[in-house]
Amino acid sequence: MTTQHVTVTVNGEAREADVEPRLLLVHLLRETFGLTGTHVGCDTSNCGACTVQVDGVSAKSCTMLAVQADGRAVKTIEGMASGADLHPLQQAFWDQHGLQCGFCTPGMIMQADWLLQENADPSEEEIREGISGNLCRCTGYVNIVKAIQQAAGTLRESESAPVVAAATTDGQAVSAEPAAAG
Amino acid sequence: MIPGQFDYVRPGSLDDALAILRDREGEAKLLSGGYSLIPLIKLRLAQPGVLVDMRDLTGLDGITETDDDLVIGARATHRQIHEHPIIADHYPTLVDLAAGIGDPQVRNWGTIGGSVAHADPASDWPALLLATNATIVCRGPGGQREIKAREFFLDTFTTAIEPTEILTEIRIARRSKGVGGGYTKLERKVGDFATVGVAAVIALGQDGTIATGRIGVTGVSPSPFAATDAEAVLAGAAPSDDTFRTAGAAAAAQSQPTADIRGPIDYKRAMVAELTVRSLRVAIGRALAFA
């Protein structure tokens, strides 16, 4: 058994590590890179708490080996905010009370971010289908769906009006650069 | 859960991959999307000596139609299949099936070849491959080999693929006029494996009777199976709910469910009968609409 050298671009920054092939991506992120925003929930590919994006595609990082991410770009919850400015999805989860204990939230937001890249104006049904691989044991999903709807609206507005800053519902300024949309 | 230790290789070509399978015969496992294999490795139900990552084996994810067949590359993801224009336009049964596999993240990464080669007794694709009697194409040291779906699923997690072979593509007979299919599945919750899944494909004859009716069933036997007794009921019969009910009863009788958290034996048999009827209803509707 030999270690493998991997280079992974995490939230835009190239990171390198020597890993055992059996190391899971979620453990590379949390333990090697110290990015503990990605959570380990069920550890059996069911709950989606560990959801990140790999080359822009949502994945359960407990069901992917670190070596599978070699040469790829990984985006985690830590890559969502721009400095002190929350991403519209983060702001919307705050505004809509889209979390209670918060354990599922990082995975939920990364999945929602992927969903909105695929479909900028999803129906409620499409949102519920889109987050069907992410379990929340607190909220009953109602406010999560509302939050994703709010963020979808914010992101569409910022796409159609690429000004310096757009206001969220509570008036807080967020970056409106296309990059902020993912 | 921490997997046991294994070696990892990422061959750049199919020939290199085949060489590794030959050199380490019996201890190598192919890694495609990983959504079936990695959970098993984490549970240590599978402990391969070496994982052969298929990521760089390009050209294995195409979806095309030839004169005879719909050809799906082994590394096509469930999502690619679900969204492909050829599938969306002509193969609604594949659309229905692909849309119900796992959850969005699973469909983003999981592949048809991985799922079929893994041969979980409750996975979705095998039911359809049995109902279409698809051809599973493998490459091995001796070249290419074609295996009919009905000779492919041998037992739980056991197929006719040799340890030195790689599943490269799946061929399903191109849909012709008067042919329609349906897939219905019962699952406890999103992402769970099927409690029961039934794929049905009906080909109508010129006189409006059923020329052939083929049925693949998953979740209720050691491996997915073709409900041949039900198919005998359908052959030559006029399509009607009575016929479908008789076929459903035959499929239920031929199933071998075990009692588990998904339900007792009687319940599962009843669901085989019901889902067979429902899939046949969908299939006849589509066959008539594509006359």
Image: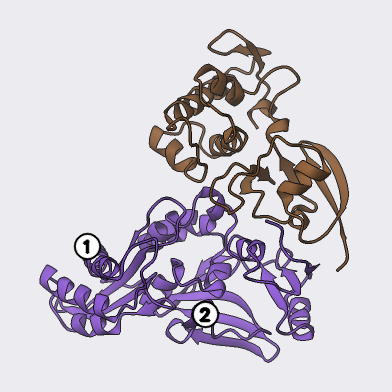
Decide: is B124 above or below A126. below
- Identify the image quadrant of residue B19: bottom right
The disc label shown at residue B136, or none = 2
Decide: is B149 above or below A137. below
Residue B131 percent across, percent down from the top left = 36, 75
Tell me if mark 1 has few (under 14), some (14-19) or many (20+) residues whose alpha carbon lies within 10 angstroms of its own: some
Q: Chain of mark 1?
A: B
Q: Which chain is purple?
A: B
Residue holding disc 1: B285
- Identify the image quadrant of residue B39: bottom right
Decide: is B205 above or below A26. below
Residue B200 percent across, percent down from the top left = 30, 71
SS at badge 2: strand
Quadrant (top left, top right, bottom left, bottom right) of the C terminus of chain B: bottom left
Residue B61 percent across, percent down from the top left = 60, 65
In front here: B68 or A113?
A113
Separation of residues labelled 2 and 1 (CA atoms): 28 Å
Asked if the residues shown at circle 2 and circle 1 are in contact, with their CB atoms under 8 angstroms apart, the answer is: no
SS at badge 1: helix
Residue B287 seen: no
